[in-house]
Amino acid sequence: MARRKRRRNAALLLLAAAIVLLPLLAPQLEGASFAGADGKAQALIESIEPAYRPWAAPLWTPPGKETESLLFALQAAVGAGVLGYCLGLSRGKRRAGAAASDDAGDERD
């Protein structure tokens, strides 16, 4: 059983390394521009209607790209934390319910 677990862990480690390394080594990505969807949408709108003026403006603009990336990462971390908490809470409730039903079955005997 321990050997099987080691193999599975090694396979997962290799898979994780491949996920990280393959995009870096892929030749078709060389010199590629990774522009976001917002920039592409803006370019498309400007090509369709050059006189278009946005009807809404952001309330606050981050001072730099680093701040924008930090806020995006913080948003992702908070979302992952909330999701993990909810999943853990539901699993704990399920286990507590199963333990309570096992205890109730033991008392009847």
Image (cartoon, grey):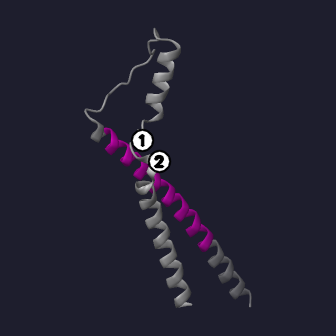
Q: Position of residue 27 (x, y in %)?
A: 44, 51
Q: Nearer the viewer, residue 6 or 23?
A: 23
The mark found on residue 94 in the picture is none
Residue occupying the far top of the picture: 51
Give the structural element (helix, strand or loop) at label 1: loop
Q: Report the residue at 42% width, 60% height from top.
A: 20
Q: Residues within 10 Å of mark 2 (few under 14, many from 20)?
A: few
Q: Report the residue at 43% width, 18% height from top.
A: 56
Q: Position of residue 7 (x, y in %)?
A: 52, 82
Q: Nearer the viewer, residue 106 or 41?
A: 41
Give the structural element (helix, strand or loop) at label 2: helix
Tell me where residue 100 sits by quadrant.
Answer: bottom right
Q: Is residue 85 magenta?
A: yes
Looking at the picture, does residue 30 appear above or below residue 22?
above
Q: Position of residue 53 (x, y in %)?
A: 44, 12
Mark 1 in CB contact with mark 2 (< 8 angstroms): yes
Q: Look at label 2 and name its amino acid.
A: Gln
Identify residue for label 1. Answer: 32
Tell me where residue 57 sits by quadrant.
Answer: top left
Q: Look at label 1 and name its amino acid.
A: Ala
The mark found on residue 28 in the picture is 2
Does the magenta stretch mainly form a helix, a strand or a loop? helix
Q: Residues within 10 Å of mark 1 (few under 14, many from 20)?
A: few
How many angstroms separate mark 1 from mark 2 (CA)?
A: 8 Å
Q: Report the residue at 50% width, 72% height from top.
A: 12
Q: Report the residue at 46% width, 8% height from top.
A: 51
Left or right? Give the position of 86 relative to 23: right
On-image quarter of the C terminus: bottom right
Q: Position of residue 55 (x, y in %)?
A: 45, 14
Tell me where residue 39 sits by quadrant.
Answer: top left
Looking at the picture, does residue 74 appear above or below residue 91?
above
Q: In the image, which residues are magenta? A: 68-96
